[in-house]
Image (cartoon, coloured by chain):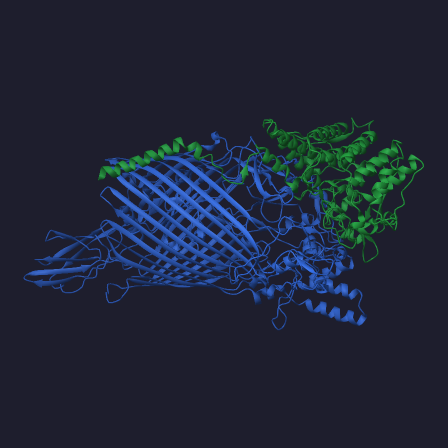
Amino acid sequence: MKTKIFNKIDLKLFSFIVLTLLTCTRAFAQYYVKGKVISSLDGQPVSGANIRFLKAAAMTKTELNGEFQFNLKVLPDTLVLTHTGLKTKKIPITIDKYNSSLLVEMEPSEKALEEVVISTGYQQIPKERATGSFTSIAKSLLNQQVTTSIIDRLEAVTSGISVDRASGYTGKLMVRGLSTLNGPVSPLIVLDNYPYEGDLNNINPNDVENITILKDAAAASIWGARAGNGVIVITTKKGIFNHTLSIQINSNLTVSGEPDLSYIKQINSSDFIDVESMLYSKNYYRSQINSANKPVLSPVVELLIKRSSASPLKQNAIDQQINSYRTLDVRDQYSRYFYQKAVNQQHSIMLNGGSETNAWLVSAGYDRNVNNLDAKYDRFNLRFNNNIRLTKKLNFETNLFYTKSNSLSGKPSYGQIISKGTIFPYAQFADANGNPIPLAKNYRQSYLNSLSIQGLQDWNYYPLTDYLHTLATTNLQDVMLNFGLDYKITDGLKTTVQYQYERQNNDKRSLQDQNSYYTRNLINLYSQVDATGNLIKRIPKGDILDLNNSVLTSNQIRGQVTYNKTLEDHSLSLLAGTEVRETLTKGVANRTYGYNSENLSYGYVDLATPYPTLVNGSTNFIPDNNSFAQTRLRYASFYGNGAYTFKNKYIMSASVRRDASNLFGVSTNNKWTPLWSAGLAWNAAAEPFLTNKILNELKLRLTYGSSGNVDPKRSAVTTLYNQGTSVYSLSPYYSFDQYANPQLKWETVSQINAGLDFAIFNNRISGSADFYLKKGSDLIGVEPIDYTAGVGFTVQKNIAQIRGKGLDLVFNTKNTIGTLNWSSDINFSYHGDKIDAYYNSDLQASNFVNQGNPRISGIVGDAIYGVYAYKWGGLNPTNGMPQGYVAGNVSTDYLSITGASTSVYDLKYFGSAMPVYYGSVGNSISYKNFTLNVRVLFKLGYFFRRNTIDYTSLNSNWIGHSDFSKRWQKPGDESHTNVPALVYPIPPNMAMFYQNAEPFVSKADHVRLQYVNVNYRLTNKGNSKRPYNSIDLYITTSNLGIIWRANKDGIDPDYAYNNSLPPTPSIAVGIKIGL
Amino acid sequence: MKTTYLKIIIASLFLLGIGTNYSCKKFLEAKSDQKLAVPTSLEELQGLLDNFSVMNQTIAGTGEASSDNYYLTKEDWESLSYENEKRIYTWEKDFLFPQDGRQNEWQCNYTAIYYSNTVLGALEKINRNQGNASKWDNIKGQALFFRAQYLLRTVLLWAVAFDETTASSDLGIPLRYTEDFNIPSVRSSVSESYRRILDDLEESANLLPIKSNHPAHPSKLASYGLLARTNLAMRRYSSASKFADSCLNLYSRLMDFNSLNQDANFPIQQFNEEVILWNRILAPGTISNSVAKIDQELYDSYEDNDLRKTIYFFKNADGSKAFKGYYEQLASPFGGIATDEIYLIKAECDARLKIGDFGMQSLNTLLKTRFKEGKFIPKTAISSDVALSIILAERRKELLMRDLRWMDIKRLNKEGANIKLTRILGDQTYVLQPNDPRYALPIPEDVIRLSGMPQNKR
């Protein structure tokens, strides 16, 4: 059963042209006919094709290598080639032709194209029998992009998938928007049959056959409590029965440019120096100068201090020195010394073959990436798949995945060199000769320079070279082994037992050698001058080594019975099973002081005794970096699903599942969450009254179901967390982990999906439309609480009900067919969500506006994540102060504006913080051997908050913004700027107000050119002298940037955070060889 | 052959079924995180009280920051990072506590109270028997002590000074007894608030061992000490005297300042022999010794032979004085209980109650350790009034930067001391008159908003 499906997949995904080489030899009135059948796409031989000779009424089959031979007595004859998934082809063989080669081109049958098989992880169902909403993405589409991780390729090519980069730097993949407010939002990733527990980067993209997205309740509910956010099923390539040895090689090289740091909106050095001089004149730094902690002061402030007691001549020199800093820009330093081009390599080889009883596949992959900051990553993948037909009824399949990867830290990125909140914009890392320049990191440079204690380590911090002394490596090994045993009990009834074991070992090693600033600083800090003037060191000289090991072990076992029976018009498919899973994670971290890698010796420290520290004499403990961790998650599930099809036209399906887990302390009642779904589908095109030449396919689907959202962090009892050993009482101490909240209920998500699949005009236009309604009830959110209760500022409560509605449209068109093949695909998604009910009692406006992550809206009817802003009264024309509103009147009472007197209803609501319309448009043009793919991505209908200058953090943390230069400076400026004037002291909460006010919200809509891919394909065209079946040469350019954006500030809304940089354009060059 | 396979499969499915049905309960009862626990055993309850970052190190010091032991220059005041700290300095009527996610004193106090309440609630479910009686009692005593300590801190800051005549109608603080955070907070009266503190402390004194193994843990000494302080705040001098006696009779050691290195950045050792109960205050930036300058008059009142003059203070570049006499050996004020304070309570009460030499002996015992060896001339007083003024002056000199001054100003003004506070920032002068309503600080506005409790009179 399974193997047939794999065959189908294979035939479906490759389109075949059969080349037949015929040689007929006459011998004793016999004509010897010989030939070979191979596929056109990859030049692979096609085995098991039926060959019928009409006149001779004889039959034969192609061999494993695609060849066949036959003796004919009479010519002419007609040869008929048939194969599942290929169009039947007739070839006349005439007597004058028998001696020459015949070239036969066969096209794949229309049926084979449609016959998409969907994998849910539990079963494989033909798409035509499915009621749910599935999106299947073939490897040919996925391979238009070149990335290390397969998941990264999904956003550009999948309908209904979006990556939210507004609420986090790395981005969160979402299927059909949000289903939860506070729980995990990422969809469940299934690799072949099981949820993938390891690192997603472990998967070799070249091993992937296709990816199926399970979008609606009927599709996903088989995964139960973890399916609330949708499911992504990754299916890997498998060995094929009756197949000759084939070899696939893929090799590519990707080069990405250096990032453009001018994208970062940094305050310019001259402005920054002016601010420092102003603050100095106002004695802002005096407490820092006096502080026994010797806090960092910038070089300009140090110079100003020097200047205050210098002679007029020296003062002049100092002024000149300060002015020389004005033209410097730390971004240049980063570009010059740290950033570089990134180079990624990816190589893979795959061998597969199969006999009548055995199908096998072996693949290996190697990736080597060097990123923009010289951080290195390499990965080695090995995979083995074997499928044995032990008997006609018994099938045994095994898979082995092995991954080994190493990563090595690189140079610091912009913003990573920090001494306050960042570094001053005129910082220099190297002098004119390229020698490292020290930078004050924890203490004033003048203090360090003044120290004259014998025996101290050099206490300077050199950003230029420090990364060389702090090496972090990660070594990951992942082994995954699974087997499945299928037994056909009777016709249609099958039992399956599957087991999977995975072990991922992750070793992190961070060595801060004795020349690193971290180590030198720590040794110096814990040094003490005793009464006789000797320096006593509490931390031994040598490296500091942190080792961190975590091991994930997962065991999963599944028993399943399936029954498939077709009796005339009735077709029944049933599945029932049970599975048990356990994931155990163990972690150990430890630190060694005084480590010497030469002879592996190490030193001792006393972690339980507080020591006076050198700078200010306060006592402190030497940092301890030892810890142990162990988590064990267990799940038990029962599931069942059934489908009944009548006359191949009417389909009914239902599924049910119950999950239980050991999530700590949840009362047993809540442990088992029942989840179910039901669906209907109608293959309308099969109805006689709709059968016509235009309509090739029309299927209507309707499903409903509920799924859950389980957050393992929530508990119904008060739980404590062991914090380790108290250095004071020397016994274990605890903090609260979860507070018992008996009022908490599980979240549920229900979804209705109505869909339509169609194909018209000979399949020239095909596509699907899915309309869905989603309802999330009892969603858990964070609610501010009267903290007199003692459990912190917020508690988790069932605070909201949300509603989402959406439309996923997919259009595939074949615009021209012939020499020039032009096809397009359009993915368009609409997802609108809103708050349906909100039980949060605290509606103070400041809870709904903030920098950074968008907050959950508090008003029924608004988008879940809404962008709100304080109403703007413009800048005061006389002093440039920002003005807001209190009780409808223009006001500069920022405490009131940001306080209780402004509620969320007084804010201006812009709209959703997540794209409401999104999708992609792809065009593929092929001419002769060339194929060009271009893909454009769009995200529309949403808003984001721009960063601007925050004078408070400018003063205290050096964090500036180029908007500083646009600030109000004189009356009249208010007509062309909204950036408030610089004032000192800063009125309370002023920054909190204007940063979150109307002028700093922009439309986030944009269109991006995601990639352009050119492929040149060579096939051997039946010329067996060529040592290959096919060769593809390809070039892919990605991250080509934004082609249209709504905002006028040049901001890429996906990368709008401080210091975040959009990915740089890259070009990949590769070759694929099929042997 | 085939039937064998079939049997194997059916058997394994069957076993799987059994496995999930019969051992399911056990299978699902395993701890999901090995570090998790539920507060059910005495060890875990002790572990909660051992959480020193909650029980022994807290955000506090608003009282000291509101008091008159120090001053700020206008520039330093302007450069303070947090608006609320600026407002504390000028006794504003509102927004004295951060409400932007930063911890504040109210929240820290009630978090510690929640820890205590959880322990007390869980203890009721643990059987007290012969085997565990001393441990059980000790834990209960510790929890009661901590609850009282944090209630006292709260009432001293957010309620008006205790006044026997109006205490039953003056607004006190919310008293919370359980871990159920859904119960709304209600303000009790001042007299109910103090009653609860005294009851908790007296009960804890009966349960706790005389001395604990570490000053982080409360002891009978600590209970007596805090009872003395509480009664002093209530101006119940005979009770205060009684508890000071109870404490000193059990433990009365003092540090000899002659043995300290006065040049050190922080000359006084952490956990020195005077410390009965450890508490570190994470104070507002206002009283950080890089900005807070010691009141010159106060500094000048130390005699030249007084070692505190060099051990407590250092000179800034501009000649002003800053504090370094922290019992924490770092720049954080000590907020716990130490014997020096108990001596001073004893002395003050004796003076007020006109007992014996009006407390002079207690005072001299303490001062002798603070003076250069052989240079101390014992203080004498001919009347209780003279004694009292000497003792109160010495109390301020000994206990500055210990977060006690605010309580002292409040209670002394009730006694008619007429202490008027003044702040000068540039050409602006701020004055806080005796018994001004602002002596009861505003409860954080977000707490008022979320709980509906009445705010203090502004």
Residue A652 visible in the picture: no
Horizontal arrangement in the rendering, residue B357 relative to residue A37 (left or right): right
Answer yes or no: is residue B88 visible: yes
Number of marks: 0
Q: Position of residue A794 (x, y in %)?
A: 61, 38
- Closer to us: A84 or B331: B331
Front one among B7 and B41: B41
Q: Position of residue A39 (x, y in %)?
A: 26, 57
Q: Residue at x 81, y 70 (%)?
A: A312
Query: What tint does the image give chain A?
Result: blue
Left of A229 or right of it: where is B137?
right
Residue lying farthest to the left in this orientation: A28
Task: For the C terminus of chain A, give its image quadrant.
Answer: bottom left
Report the front residue among A331 and A271: A331
Q: Residue furthest right?
A: B382
Residue B196's x, y, as percent? 72, 28
Quarter of the picture containing the N terminus of chain A is top left
Q: Which residue corresponds to the image point at 36% horizontal and 32% vertical from the top-left?
A: B18
Q: Position of residue B25 (x, y in %)?
A: 44, 32
- Which residue of the protein is positioned furthest toward the bottom in this rendering? A433
Residue at x 32% of width, y 33% of height: B14
In the image, the chain rendered in green is B
Residue A533 falls in image quadrant: bottom right
Task: Check the image and report above or below for B368 versus A1028.
Answer: above
